[in-house]
Every structure is written in structure tokens, then in C-alpha cells.
Image: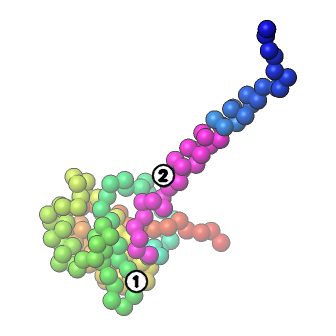
Amino acid sequence: MKLESTLRSRREFLHFASLLDILFLVLLFFLLSSNAVVRSGIAVIVPQSRSALQAAASADIITLSGGTPSQIFFNDRLVTTKELEHELADGSGSEGNKQVVLRADQAAPYGQVIKISNIVVGSGYSLILATRPEINQ
């Protein structure tokens, strides 16, 4: 005796589940590859600029905070200018790459920015100044 079902087949649900799974994977990929993951936890407002360069993937990052006693961070670690000179001379943070990104707050003293730039260039690294895109008004 052959039994037959009177219910319809619900195979379209399986197609929807796999499509939903792929959409979640694509969303996860974009979330993990965004620029927010790469940025350091030190809040600075970099100045605006019309020019733009390609992103430096494996460069060391020096962050100069604004304020009266401006602080210097080398790869998210608080350092002094002397410690920064020793870190760059040793090449301990570079992992073979000779690029340094300087993220200086727009309120940071200009003399301090130049002093750090001279330390970086004097140590044989190429310097990249981090800016944000200029907003057309």
C-alpha cells in the first residue's frame, strides 16, 4: 500500500535559509573589515585635507593627543620623546616595514608635531600624516 501526503512540499524555505545565511556572512565580513577595527582607541580629531593617499596596512602608528600636556602614543602605548627615539632606532615595532603614520590632533602644538616628524624621518622611516577628507560646504 502506497501512502501519499496531501501536504505541499515546503522546499522554498530551505532556499530562503541558505540565502539568509549568506547575507549574514557578507554582513559579518564587512563589519570585520571596516576601518573602525583598525583605528586605535585614542580619540583625536585629525585635521582636514583635500589630498588623500592609500592606506598603510602594516605601518606603525604614532598618536599625538591635543591639550596642554600633549601625550605621545606609539602603537597605543604611552611613551616620551626619548622612548620614541629608542623604539624607532631599535625597529622593534616596525616588523620590517619602514612606514610610520602620525595621527596628530588638530589642537596639538605645531612644534610638537614637527619634533616628532624630525624623530621619525631621522630614524630612517617614511612619514605619513593622517588626515580626514575635507567636507565641501
> Is residue 127 in view from this perspective?
no
Identified by mark 2, the residue type is Ser
Which x, y percent locates residue 12? Answer: 74, 31
Residue at disc 1, secondary structure: loop
Q: Quadrant of the N terminus?
A: top right
Identified by mark 1, the residue type is Gly
Sort mark 2 into few (<14), some (14-19) or many (20+) by Cα contacts within 10 Å: few
Q: Residue 33 got which mark?
A: 2
Return the residue at label 1: 66
Q: Quadrant of the C terminus?
A: bottom right
> Is residue 1 placed above or below 110 in the rendered structure?
above
Q: Residue 88 got which mark?
A: none
Going 47% across and 76% down the picture, which residue do you hit?
Answer: 45
Q: Is residue 24 magenta?
A: yes
Magenta extent: 19-43
> Is residue 68 placed above or below 125 in the rendered structure?
below
